[in-house]
Image (cartoon, rainbow, N blue to C red):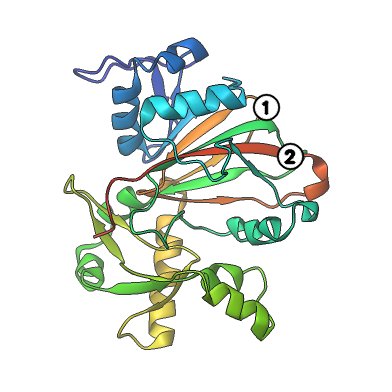
Amino acid sequence: MIDRIEPSGWGLHAFAPVQHEIGAIVDLDKQSLLTGEHSNELRLLLEERGVLIFPGVSFTSDEQIAFTRTLGTYVPDRPDGETTTITIDPEAGETARLTESAYFWHFDGYMNEVPILASLLCCEQPAVTGGHTEFCNTYAGWEALPAARKTQLEGLYAVHAMAGAQMSVEPEPSYETFSKWRKVRASTLPLVWTHRSGRKSLVIGNTAVNILGVDPLEGLDLLVWLRDWVTQERFRYNHSWTAGDAVLWDNTGTLHRATPYDYRCGRKMRRTKLAGDEPIA
């Protein structure tokens, strides 16, 4: 049973936190979600909790797109505007191979001038074993840092590149393969994102390859420490999928990863994305 909580001044009243620092289960039926009447409250709740879970809502592809549009600007990956199927099945080609890097903590759109705001993932068929999706709250991770560590991080920048993510999957690529990765735009981003709201979040993940002006090993030491810090249990939520579930996450204030699964199991997921409106600063 989901506890009903009424935040002061909010119309949305049917949600319950899943962890102290991250996540909320939203107890609204499909038709209520599709009307868009709760969109403002959901956007506020998303920023506050990082991850929103809609158990068993069973959106069709068209309904998933329609719900995404109630929350902001829908950004399709495909020219036909349809949802994106997430798969690691080799029959899907090179895209599936690249998707294997999603087994490691990351955020989406590091190469874009403005990263996407959020993603919505819907489950048609879960994996038999594994195939969960884990999230961690990088707002809460920053806020809980010791003051000395915050001082150390302010003003530091890291280079984010596809090579960083893909070498976690293929640590000894051919130079031809590595050169293909290098063709994807890299970005130099602050370790600390100061948002327009005034809140701050950490900008890390498996795309980070080095910290500017820092000895390579010292920089790697710091990136590993930060990853361990922000992914500790207090900031982390693990979603075990059931067919029909939908999960929305704030790409500007969380990291996520999938847990390994057998690609032959038939796991089938659909993704839609919301356009961002704020560059990393």
Task: Choose between 65 and 225: the one closer to the eye.
Answer: 65
Neighbour tally class for label 1: few under 14, some 14-19, many 20 plus, Cα within 10 Å: some
Q: Position of residue 273 (x, y in %)?
A: 47, 40
Q: How many marks?
A: 2
Residue in the picture at 40% in, 63% down: 204
Tag 2–tag 1 contact (CB < 8 Å)? no
Question: Which quadrant, please, contains the C terminus?
Answer: bottom left
Name the secondary structure under disc 2: loop
Q: Position of residue 101 (x, y in %)?
A: 61, 61
Mark 1 lies on residue: 243
225 displayed left or right of 168 = left
Residue shown at 60%/27% (left/top)? 61
Label 1's element?
loop
What is the quadrant of residue 43 in the picture? Answer: top left
Residue drawn at x 49%, y 29% as measured from the top left: 53
In the image: residue 76, left or right of residue 276: right
**Could you say where residue 203 lies in the image, as x and y percent from the top left?**
35, 61
Residue 210 lies in what quarter of the image? bottom left
Residue 172 visible, this orientation: no
Above or below 59: residue 255: below
Amino acid type assigned to the residue bearing label 2 in the image: Arg
Residue at mark 2: 267
Q: Earlier in the sequence, mark 2 or mark 1?
A: 1
